[in-house]
Image: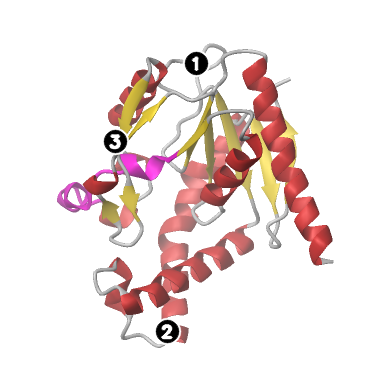
């Protein structure tokens, strides 16, 4: 059974990689936006697709979390509890980076989950590869039919059931909390005093109060504008459910 699940998962990743490679071969569609809910597995899918595309293509993956405003700015604007909502992203910086990378190279800032803030030490310069995968939040509905240099050439939406997303979010929160036991600088160290059942209940309130409204109001509407929709189930099996690139 495990082999069947792994094969199905690989088939879905492989199908997406093949589709992106075909789009690259048939035109200059090389910048891919990958979005979906918090905790849907965007980073993992981006890595798996990248591994499937290599060594035939040069591939870079970048998280859009780097374009979140630093916590100090979010605090000043009263937006810290809305982190991840559209207004918490540096949209101008995002557009500039895409425009510049198309010209050859651009600096991409990075966000650390451990400190829950932008970490200047993680900034990196990305030179335009065959395929660049931008994964995360902060995307807007693409311009049609001709897209600007400041937006992805292809938008992929990673879809999943709300109950699965909540489960994955809570498990991820607990994982960061456990890791904080050996890292006192971790953002999650502030909750080490909680017993695990209390922590899980707290993580669920964060999901219900922040991430679920963001999903319903701002993230999921992008599914209707996506070029490709990928569906993921609780077992992390993925498949292309819609392809509007033909």
CA gap between label 2 and label 3 equals 34 Å
Q: Where 62 falls versus 114 (above or below)?
A: above
Say the numbered circle drawn on residue 112: none
243 lies left or right of 46: right
| Residue named by callout 2 | 198
- Is tag 2's residue or tag 3's residue first in the polypeptide sequence? 3
Q: Residue at x 62, y 33 (%)?
A: 55
Q: Where 85 falls versus 115 (above or below)?
A: above
Residue 206 colored magenta? no
| Residue named by callout 1 | 147
Q: Residue at x 44, y 23 (%)?
A: 128
The location of residue 93, given as percent across then percent down, is: 29, 30
- Is tag 3's residue or tag 1's residue first in the polypeptide sequence? 3
| Front residue of 130 and 135 | 130
Q: Residue at x 59, y 28 (%)?
A: 57
Q: Where 27 falls versus 244 (above or below)?
A: above
Span of residues in magenta: 62-79
| Front residue of 87 and 111 | 111
Q: Residue at x 63, y 47 (%)?
A: 159
29 lies left or right of 229: left
Q: Where 194 falls versus 96 (above or below)?
A: below
- Packing grade of label 3 (10 A; few <14, some 14-19, many >=20) is some
79 lies left or right of 103: left
CA gap between label 3 and label 1 equals 20 Å
| Residue named by callout 3 | 90
């Amino acid at each position: 059974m495990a082999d069947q699940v792994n094969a199905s998962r690989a088939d879905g990743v492989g199908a997406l990689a093949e589709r992106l490679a075909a789009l690259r071969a048939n035109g200059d569609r090389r910048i891919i936006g990958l979005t979906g809910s918090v905790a849907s597995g965007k980073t993992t899918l981006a890595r798996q697709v990248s591994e499937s595309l290599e060594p035939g293509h040069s591939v870079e993956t970048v998280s859009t979390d780097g374009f979140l405003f630093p916590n100090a700015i979010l605090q000043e604007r009263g937006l810290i509890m809305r982190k991840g909502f559209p207004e918490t992203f540096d949209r101008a910086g995002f557009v500039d980076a895409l425009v510049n990378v198309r010209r050859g190279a651009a600096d991409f800032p990075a966000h650390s989950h451990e400190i829950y803030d932008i970490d200047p030490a993680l900034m990196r310069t990305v030179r335009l590869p065959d395929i660049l995968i931008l994964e995360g939040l902060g995307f807007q509905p693409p311009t049609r039919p001709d897209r600007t240099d400041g937006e992805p050439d292809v938008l992929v939406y990673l879809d999943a059931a709300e109950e699965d997303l909540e489960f994955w979010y809570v498990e991820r929160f607990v994982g960061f909390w456990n890791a904080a036991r050996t890292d006192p600088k971790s953002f999650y160290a502030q909750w080490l005093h909680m017993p695990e059942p209390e922590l899980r209940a707290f993580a669920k309130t964060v999901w219900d109060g922040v991430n679920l409204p963001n999903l319903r109001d701002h993230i999921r509407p992008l599914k209707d504008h996506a070029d490709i929709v990928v569906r993921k189930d609780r077992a992390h099996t993925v498949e292309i459910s819609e392809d509007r690139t033909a």
